[in-house]
Image: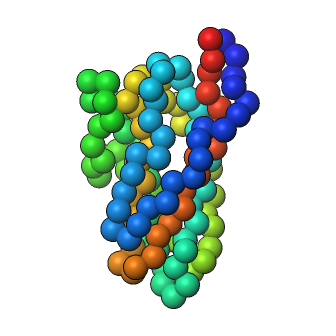
Amino acid sequence: MALNKGSLGFGTQIGPGGNAHVLVVDSSEPVYVKSILVHSLDVNNIQNVAIHYIQNNAGSPGTATSTNRIARLGITTSDTFFFEPAYPITLTSNGDSIYVANEGITSDSINVVVLGDKEVA
């Protein structure tokens, strides 16, 4: 199998107190997450952001819990954080996902972009 040296998708904006599965495997082709960029749109406060690596639930995205949270970030005002694990996060089955929660208490959103590679047949 070859790697598709392309994008894993466009960015996702997550509102205050919101959350989203920012990447979900839907083609049974392994995905390798090399980094996750999180940008805070807040100009006055620190934004707290949780990143979860979630195993599928019968082929659908699973639920975020404290046992699958892999990072909690405190991002300063109007800043960008690059979450880059030492080895790529591998998602292999339909429904495996990366989930991000904007735990900020302000009225501002965050932008999230997932970077990596996907295997293609």
Give me the residue at 35% from left, 78% from top.
Answer: 105
Looking at this view, is 109 or 51 the one in front?
109
Looking at this view, is 67 or 61 the one in front?
61
Q: Is residue 103 above or below residue 83?
A: below
Residue at the farthest bottom position: 44
Q: Tell me if residue 59 can be seen.
A: yes
Q: Is residue 20 above or below residue 102?
A: above
Q: Quadrant of the N terminus?
A: top right
Query: Does 116 sit left or right of 47 as displayed?
Result: right
Query: Does 74 sit left or right of 57 as displayed?
Result: right
Give me the residue at 31% from left, 24% from top.
Answer: 59
| Render colour scheme | rainbow
x and y percentages locating residue 63 in the rendered image: 27, 43
x and y percentages locating residue 23 in the rendered image: 48, 40
Give me the residue at 55% from left, 71% from top.
Answer: 40
x and y percentages locating residue 12 in the rendered image: 51, 54
Would you identify the image quadrant in which residue 103 lies? Answer: bottom left
Q: Tell me if residue 83 can be seen.
A: no
